[in-house]
Amino acid sequence: MTISTHEGQDHRAFLKQIARKAMAEYGLLPDFSPSAISQAQQAQPANAQVSAVGGTTAASAAPRDLRQRLWCSIDNDDSMDLDQLTVCESQPAGAVRILVAIADVDALVAAGSPIDQHARQNTTSVYTAAEMFPMLPERLSTDLTSLAYNQERPALVVDFVVDASGSTGEATVYRALVLNRAKLAYNSVAVWIEGHGPMPAAMAAVSGMAEQVRAQDEVAQRLRKSRYERGALDFQTIETRPVFDGNSVHDLSEERDNRAHQLIEDFMVAANGVTVKFLQARGFPSIRRVVRSPERWDRLVALAGQLGARLPAAPDSRALSEFLTARRAADPVRFPDLSLSVIKLLGAGEYVVEGPNETGEGHFGLAVKDYTHSTAPNRRFPDLVTQRLLKAAIAGTPVPYAAADLGEIATHCTDMEDEAHKVERLVRKAAGALLLESQIGSVFDGIVTGASPKGTWVRIFHPPVEGRVVRGFEGVDVGDRLRVRLTHTDAARGFIDFVKA
């Protein structure tokens, strides 16, 4: 399929063409099969026979009735595929009990079913400015398997206690029936938590919810402080999203991390660690999320040296964490650019299978050894697989996957995640090219985001668009500042070309 653009074309339709073409080229299925569509149309809400078991240990695999708790979801403003709810309660000696409810997707998506086959091929939802390609049909992901507002839903609950120092103690996982009492959004919650804006209306409508969210924020900060002390890395990232004027790309908006993002991230990191230990204790394997020690540590050392800091010769997450914390305090305006450089140099994560008695490399960026992906089964296939492992472990039944099958799934998920990122990146670059096509010859300041035999890449600061440096890149490396001139754009191929100015 040939894609061309011209003045006045519908940018939305154009970007959608690019997205669908890229999905096919990278081995991702843009559409569901007729059998998967039929399965989704015939699906009915999952029923759960709840038990009256309480406390922090389950005497039965039957779901507990936790509908009366002050559960809430915090996600993007427009998200309908809600994977998790959170709630917490005070315990003696300053401890806090955290409950993370995860949507029971497996209740409606059986292994080997048409929908499962689609999910196993794509392994992830793909989010582009033009079109979202969900891993599961929207009748499920945004309705029947979503922990939607005011809907009773079956879930797996990761239940753990955090002490006054931020360490995780007593923990378990069990099935439950839950009810989302407030659908909240990151930005409005963050503005309120940080004291810069009013309480969100959805929060104000539920008695006790404001106190509940403040308590969650406090214990999340406690968890975060403990992770930083162990060497977790502190980043400030910027995500961009096209802003449309009608059907034309008008600008790129920047979305930055905030306290509400951190709250959910900290709870999910802790819940994922509990999940691994729960499976280990029951003799089950797990699909781990791993970020290995960075191969380009020497460049990180050099980058720190340019800023007057010293890192040890060998990879050390604690030393890197202390460097990043110091730089955030010293230069908060440029810290997102430094964060981007470090993220690029750390390299991508991957999925690996580990048996119950094995100890792998862990996650360098999070400074944890036991880490999986389990909290987003509507959006990621590894999380759905982990959910099936958890349900078998809870019920005391055999591991539902053969070892070789788990290994193949882990490898495929790593590969397809990379392909999905390529689709998302291509559409972002196409949108950026549309925005910049009238600015050929303009000069921009930027930062080098990639330098290898395959090419040198720079992200300009405004608009925050990444492109290739086709001339004048000799001697530059990731993290270097560079002044560049725009020479060429090709939106259909996502090409944005610069030369050193």
Image (spheres, helix red, strand yellow):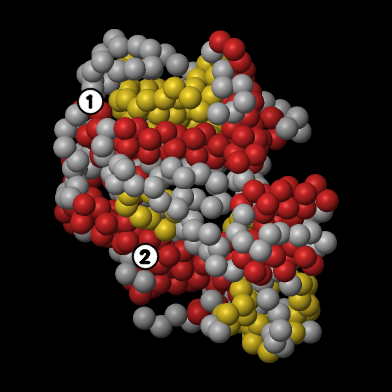
Residue at point 73%, 53% (across, down): 323
Q: Which quarter of the rendering shows the C terminus?
A: bottom right
Quarter the N terminus occupies? bottom left
Residue 404 location (% of width, % of height): 20, 56
Q: Using the rendered view, name the quadrant where residue 198 is placed.
A: top right
- Left or right, 423 with respect to 479, comes to left
Examine the image and state in which quarter residue 93 appears: top right
Identify whether 177 is placed above or below 420. Answer: above
Q: Amino acid at mark 2?
A: Asp
Image point (38%, 55%), residue name: 351
**Which residue is situated farthest in the bottom direction here?**
471
Picture mark count: 2
Query: Could you tell which of marks 1 and 2 lies nearer the N-terminus?
Result: 1
Q: CA distance from mark 1 to mark 2?
A: 35 Å
Vertical side of 341 occupied by 275: above or below: above
Residue 343, numbered circle: none
Between 364 and 192, the one lying in front of the other is 364
Camera-nearest label, 1 or 2? 2
Query: Is 410 left, or right, of 457 in this rendering?
Result: left
* Mark 1 nearby-residue class (10 Å; few <14, some 14–19, many ≥20): few
**Is residue 427 or residue 84 the one in the foreground?**
84
What residue does disc 1 label?
Answer: 47
Query: Residue at 30% across / 42% down in the picture?
Result: 356
Q: In the visual, does 314 lie left or right of 277?
A: right
Q: Position of residue 174 (x, y in %)?
A: 32, 25
